[in-house]
Amino acid sequence: DVKVTQSSRYLVKRTGEKVFLECVQDMDHENMFWYRQDPGLGLRLIYFSYDVKMKEKGDIPEGYSVSREKKERFSLILESASTNQTSMYLCASSTWRQGMEETQYFGPGTRLLVL
Amino acid sequence: SQKIEQNSEALNIQEGKTATLTCNYTNYSPAYLQWYRQDPGRGPVFLLLIRENEKEKRKERLKVTFDTTLKQSLFHITASQPADSATYLCALDGNTGKLIFGQGTTLQVKP
């Protein structure tokens, strides 16, 4: 079974702090994603990566950055946390090739509270 | 712009009945559509995938239909159980390695 793990289930940070969210997958998937999920807004894509050291902006990248130094690990960084970044953060991975179907495997999520 | 719509109102049904959830989309022609289940405080879990050339797909008590003319997918759970209570998300392929998710519909099955 694919396993996607996230470094923390719950996190409380203060405004202005730099926050690191880590995600690791064990299935050698090429693609990794970071979403945030808020009530009424659904899943919104922040950043994704097709390969090591590659990254693409999603729909809401402002205030975030990412790092993918190893294939299995994808980190989301909040450079200076703000209260409007309080949310549930979900990491996902998938293997996808042009013309093939993609299924995403999600981690358990990190619920971040910024005070 | 591409848009996916799922009923934002929760669906409440009695145990044993069939639950039907709807996913509508506009301005897009996906090659396939997926349904995920999400429990509170957890990440979504993949349930079923249906391709554009398939009308219907079944898996145990689950059935998905895909009408590319109506731009709609229906997700059915037959003989529903309280354990089926969750939020169900539909997702379309973005043909770029990205999936586009709907907001989800919460299903509550009452014993």
Image: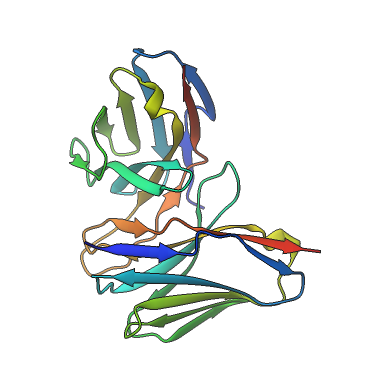
The image quadrant where one finds the C terminus of chain B is bottom right
Q: In this view, does B12 lie above or below A17?
A: below
Q: Nearer the viewer, residue A115 or A51?
A: A115
The image quadrant where one finds the N terminus of chain B is bottom left
Q: Position of residue B109 (x, y in %)?
A: 72, 63
Q: Which of B23 and B53 is in front in this view?
A: B23
Q: Position of residue B34 (x, y in %)?
A: 42, 67
Q: Is residue B49 above or below residue A46?
A: below
Q: Position of residue A72 (x, y in %)?
A: 35, 38
Q: Is residue A6 above or below residue B100?
A: above
User: Residue at the location (28% across, 72% down)?
Assistant: B30
User: Residue at the location (54% across, 26% down)?
Assistant: A10
Q: Where is residue A71 in the image (x, y as percent from the top left)?
A: 29, 39
User: Residue at the location (72% across, 59% down)?
Assistant: B83
User: Residue at the location (43% across, 76% down)?
Assistant: B73
Find the residue positioned furthest to the front: B9
A19 sits left or right of B43 in the view? left
B80 sits left or right of B101 in the view? right
B44 sits left or right of B91 in the view? right
Q: In this view, does B80 lie above or below A7?
A: below
Q: Nearer the viewer, residue B61 or B67?
A: B67
